[in-house]
Amino acid sequence: MILPVYVLNGPNLNLLGVREPEIYGKATLRDIEQAVDARAKTHGLNVVFRQSNHEGVLVDWIQEARTQSCGVIINPGAYSHTSIAIYDAFKALDKPVIEVHLSNPHQRESFRHLDYVSKVAKGVITGLGINGYLYAIDAMAELVKA
């Protein structure tokens, strides 16, 4: 049996649908979770979908994923640009990692151009809104079945 895919979401993503919808879209995190779960099922995968505003909690989940998941999809939010702790946790994870961003950070403020997580991710999907999560599930399915 294939272990579940962890789909982790960082700070402020609990506010999707109301926080800057012109940038992040109108879908809520619950909408994304439902779409991700449905897409994962088409590949015979299960998902553990979580969100936290706290860096240490995300690190704990990444460490948990070492034994409890087949891979991690993460939208680390602003922690992409600041968290060496999350970077280090991923370096210790011997599983595929795909980073997702609803917007394209490279088209935004210059401080968003530095991305620690991308340095340890197998792939990065940016700027495609909710579809980025779905494409990440498709890619993860290929990676874990290979």
Image (tube, grey):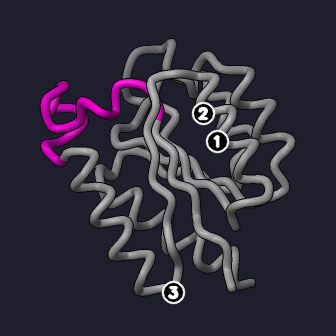
Mark number for residue 29?
A: none
Query: Which residue type does callout 1 highlight?
Result: Trp
Q: Nearer the viewer, mark 1 or mark 3?
A: 1
- Residue at horizontal 79 percent and vertical 53 percent from the top: 66
> Cβ–Cβ below 8 Å for labels 1 and 2?
yes
- Return the x and y of residue 54 as percentages of the image width and height: 52, 21
Residues shaded magenta: 10-27
- Residue at horizontal 60 percent and vertical 33 percent from the top: 58
Indicate whether residue 60 is drawn in magenta: no
- Return the x and y of residue 21 as percentages of the image width and height: 14, 33
Q: Which residue is mark 2?
A: 58
Quarter of the rendering containing residue 5: bottom right
Asked if residue 3 lies left or right of residue 19, the reply is right
Query: Which residue type does callout 3 highlight?
Result: Gly
- How far apart marks 3 and 2 lie (CA) works out to 25 Å
- Return the x and y of residue 64 as percentages of the image width and height: 72, 47
- Pointer 1: residues within 10 angstroms few (<14), some, or many (20+)? some
Query: Which residue type does callout 2 highlight?
Result: Leu
Indicate whether residue 21 is drawn in magenta: yes
Q: Main secondary structure of the magenta part?
A: loop
Q: Which residue is mark 3?
A: 44
- Pointer 3: residues within 10 angstroms few (<14), some, or many (20+)? few
Tell me the SS state at disc 3.
Answer: loop
Assign the N terminus to one quadrant of the image: bottom right
Tell me the SS state at disc 1.
Answer: helix
Q: Which residue is mark 1?
A: 61
Asked if residue 73 lies left or right of residue 15, the reply is right
Instruction: Looking at the image, tell me whether mark 3 or mark 2 is earlier in sequence order.
Output: 3
